[in-house]
Image: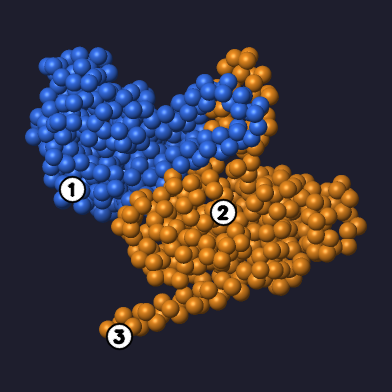
Chain colours: A blue, B orange
Amino acid sequence: MKIAVDAMGGDYAPGVVIEGLALTVQEYPDYDFVLVGHSDKVRFYLEKYGLADNPHISVVHAESVCEMSDLSAVALRSKKDSSITVCVKLLKEGKVDAMVTPGHTGATVAATKVLLRTLPGVDRPALAANMPSQTGRFLLMDAGANPDCTVLNLEQFAIMGEIYAQYLFKKDNPSIGLLSVGGEDVKGCELTKEAFKCMERLPINFVGNVEADTIFEGRADVLISDGFAGNVLLKGAEGLAKSTFVWLKRVLSKNALRIIWAMLAQNVFRELKAFGDADSVGGAPLLGINGICIIGHGSSNPKAVLNAIRVAAECVHFKLNEKIVSGIAAANEANRKRTAEETGK
Amino acid sequence: MKIAVDAMGGDYAPGVVIEGLALTVQEYPDYDFVLVGHSDKVRFYLEKYGLADNPHISVVHAESVCEMSDLSAVALRSKKDSSITVCVKLLKEGKVDAMVTPGHTGATVAATKVLLRTLPGVDRPALAANMPSQTGRFLLMDAGANPDCTVLNLEQFAIMGEIYAQYLFKKDNPSIGLLSVGGEDVKGCELTKEAFKCMERLPINFVGNVEADTIFEGRADVLISDGFAGNVLLKGAEGLAKSTFVWLKRVLSKNALRIIWAMLAQNVFRELKAFGDADSVGGAPLLGINGICIIGHGSSNPKAVLNAIRVAAECVHFKLNEKIVSGIAAANEANRKRTAEETGK
């Protein structure tokens, strides 16, 4: 197992990434890692975390970094030697089994789409975000890779989502819902109304339309959406969660008694925050790309880096992409047959 | 001032609506009200709340009720004598100045669109939801009236939203943002990318793309969206807020100390909940419809009913619809001129 890690990705790179790698080598001493980034900076932190002489870690220099403020397409064109692009190239050349970046989602999507392409039969990749619900967690996909989607895209997201959820939630038959604006079959926008009919015909555990409020009650294991509405749901939830803690702080600093009370309750708030904790999740895979690519949160901490690497390795072991290829092929074949039959009539 | 109130709307009708009306007549003793609903039930609650002999309250019988589980279009066709439809007819016939319903949003949108039509020059109405942010509140529109929108629709929502925000937030020049999946101008889906260019040319305080996380920090006074993504943001926020309290309850019932601690903190939680409180807001107007129509939350309490009626009366006083007609006319004229110039070139 050899994994490329983008050392320059995220808000606290490269320190936090290498600190995360230090945790990882303890847990997975047999894995090999290729750290991609500015070699001087990377070596400084390898020294710092006692990894300088680790035989399982090699460094590949990348001259530039995709900053969070960079536009994806511009970053791809003008920063051909960015740490993200170098990771993607290593993956393309078969020099690593998977890549992990806590970096720029848009730039990673752009680089993988252009350099790696999608898996055979897959039209568009989808970012599968792992989100909390009252009963556990659910996968939201697409969480933002494709702002505009077709019915075929949503159908393929459902197939890929089912396979990833089988690994992630250890369920044979995970439930798949379609994000919509009403629970009834006929509700939604033109895209979801058409997608509903197609998803009903798929050999999946389709539970129909799911509204954005009931998904947090655990209505489905996988929630299918175009990347625009999916990103709105993801970012909206992140924003509201942050604001809730701001509001909580505001009511808790109203008087001295409350301030003392809040100090006593630090553990409670920590546990509450843990429900939304992205660090234990590690990262979101970009499903449908011809290579295992896990994208972490920009604010990943060392634990998040470890978990993102763990997810990457597990996806390789699970043979995720082989399963996606055969799942998509079967669906495409069924679609082809149905179209032929319908045309025959 | 004469306002039609749908007595049968919402989860706790008609009791809660008439209890709300009892609060309202104390605050606005000069207003007249037409209570629409099953007259026996309505009169029972008028007795109960001491309103049976109030000369400002009349009752109009409506045989049926749009249940929350009814489909909008079906409800409109098959329940022609529903309390919502009767309210809309009173408004159409000029017998009342405004209507308020804590009922079925979809059925109200359908009934007003068909019976009242939109204001001159307005293509589609938009539901303007009032939501909390760290710095105050913002208007989200469309919150769900139109799952599929055109660029023209979004442009008109911006104009209507500016006018409503001038009344609601008492700001001359409220900021208008466009809900998108990236802060930069070029980010978004095809619809928002095109809408961005059009909104830049409008005579409004356009602050560009706003992501679903930063809107809760107070990035804009008005957030423009199609009704699909808007509804996802609204419902997602409602669902996450509910789940957050479920999670909070879970961590607070872990041991005896925490249970006592939580009991002492009831006020804190009440104040925290108040940030998301829809009751003080009352209801969301359906902007662009040829008549003042305020739609309350299905779970409205008496205070929410009072506030919805207050909003309705204030919209009438503010001459909201006259302002919308002239705002839209000016924008349409500017668009026509620009198109003529561009074609002339």
Instruction: Identify residue type, mark 3.
Output: Gly
Figure quadrant of residue A235: top left
Figure quadrant of residue A66: top left
Residue A186 location in percent, x, y?
47, 51
Characterize the local packing of mark 1: few (<14), some (14-19) or many (20 or more) Cα atoms within 10 angstroms: many
| Circles 1 and 2 on the same subunit | no
SS for tag 3? helix
C-beta proximity under 8 Å, tags 1 and 2? no
Q: Chain of mark 2?
A: B
**Would you name the residue on which mark 2 appears?**
B129
**Would you name the residue on which mark 3 appears?**
B344
Q: Which is in the foreground here, disc 1 or disc 3?
A: 1
Q: Is residue B328 above or below residue B312?
A: below
Figure quadrant of residue B257: top right
Q: Chain of mark 1?
A: A
C-beta proximity under 8 Å, tags 1 and 3? no
**Would you name the residue on which mark 1 appears?**
A76
**Residue B304 as seen in the image, left or right of residue A199:** right
Instruction: Identify residue type, mark 2.
Output: Ala
